[in-house]
Image: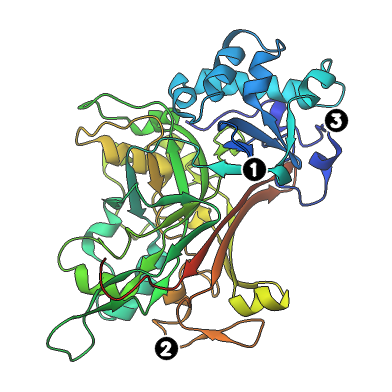
Amino acid sequence: MAMPLDHTHDPAARSWLASAQTAGCDFPIQNLPFAVFRRAGGSEVFRGGVAIGDQVVDLAALAAGGSLEGLALDAARACARPALNDFFALGPAAWRALRHALFASLKSGAAAVDATRDCLVPQSDIEHALPARIGDYTDFYTSIDHALNIGRLLKPDDPITPNFQWIPIAYHGRVSTLGVSGQRFHRPMGQTMAPGAVAPAYGPCARLDYELELGIYIGQGNAAGEAIALDRAEDHIFGICLLNDWSARDIQFWEMAPLGPFLAKNFATTVSPWIVTMDALAPYRTAWTRPAGHPQPLDYLEGEANRAQGAIDIRLEVWLESERDRAAGSGPTRLSGTSFRHQYWSIAQMVAHHTVGGCSLNPGDLFGSGTISGPGPGEAGAMIELTRGGQAPMALADGDTRAFLQDGDAVMLRGWCEKPGAARIGFGESRGMVLPAMGRRPA
């Protein structure tokens, strides 16, 4: 199930590109994440690229340069297009062939340094698009700590629904408002029901929130009616990014009776541009556990490989930059930090459950992991948890406070993996900014 360790994970490996060895660098040679980019300010077509240090390898140029062959060349040619779907569809053997070829061309002592150097573009000069044509987006709800934190606010005596511990709960989200890091969106409008009111009111969301999540990109799909077995699920996952599932809490609590979220979630979702591959994450696999006193998964969600290495220790942080921070140049405030290893359901279980009823997945489909909250203080992945529903506003570094997000606020999600005996790898950043509501009435 988990990808095996190989020479590309060697923590002693170095690149001839000096910036890949910079302390705290997200993109050393052991990472090699994928994105879609072009030089900013021009009319170039978007194409696939791979991050190394402070540069990006232009895969269209690399494919045309003659240094690749075989399956690695086929993969690079698929990456030369404006979206990575065709590359995703090639499957794990092609993904790994290109990773190994890139590693060989970027490592210290590589034979064709000049040919690869000619394919580099500074990351400071580029702009991104969504890395794939995302046909379907499914957002899960898989953190028991998040579920308990929210449940205790709404139903203190019965905080968690009975099904949470039996199935990876999810809903289908809106693709049209998915955006890449840097997304700016207007505060959503909708209906809310104030406590004690006899009728709802229409207006701008007053309880706007973020949700710290990971995005999971599907690689190879499956045919309708053909369920993906748990032990094969990760053959269908290309990689992982950061994802902010912005949430209008006051709209959400009124409309979620009895169905799932609608307007509360369909106005914006922000992903980071770089996709860290499952291969790159191999050193950070860890055991997936379920407390002995909890219900254990049904057979189709249970497996030895998932128990042994189904969790991934991805460290995550949320930062907030207010309008005042930007004006003063004072820097953002760290709101929380946690790890993806705490998630109650694994990504393999999400894939297996998604398809068990006959649903087909396609290359480029996106999953949201659900809000990632940990068990300790300061590990909550949403502001509603950190402020206890707005009753305990958080102090910011600039002296201001927040119960929920204000206009002009920017939220940054950051993620990385590190441990002794492995190279630190990072995810870059997912950044989104709240703009004022467009108006009280639709045009």
Q: Which image quadrant for residue 60?
A: top right
Residue 329 picture quarter = bottom right
Counting residues from the start of the chain, the first of labels 3 and 2 encountered is 3
Say which of 213 and 274 sits in front.
274
- The answer to whether mark 3 and mark 2 are in CB contact below 8 A is no
Give the residue number, with chain letter if any, for mark 3.
16
Give the residue at mark 1: 40
Numbered badge on residue 48:
none
| Residue 443 appearing in the image | yes
Residue at the image position 67 percent from the left and 28 percent from the top: 58
Where in the figure is residue 139, as x and y percent of width and height? 34, 51
Q: Nearer the viewer, residue 341 or 315?
A: 315
333 left or right of 19 in image: left
Q: Residue at x 49, y 41 (%)?
A: 130
Q: Nearer the viewer, mark 2 or mark 1?
A: 1
x, y (%) of residue 266?
A: 32, 58
Q: Which residue is the site of mark 2?
A: 391
Looking at the picture, does residue 137 appear above or below residue 116? Answer: below
Measured from the top left, where is residue 248 in percent x and y? 35, 70
Residue at 60% from the left image edge and 32% from the top image edge: 44
Could you tell me if the residues under marks 2 and 1 are in contact, i.e. CB atoms within 8 Å? no
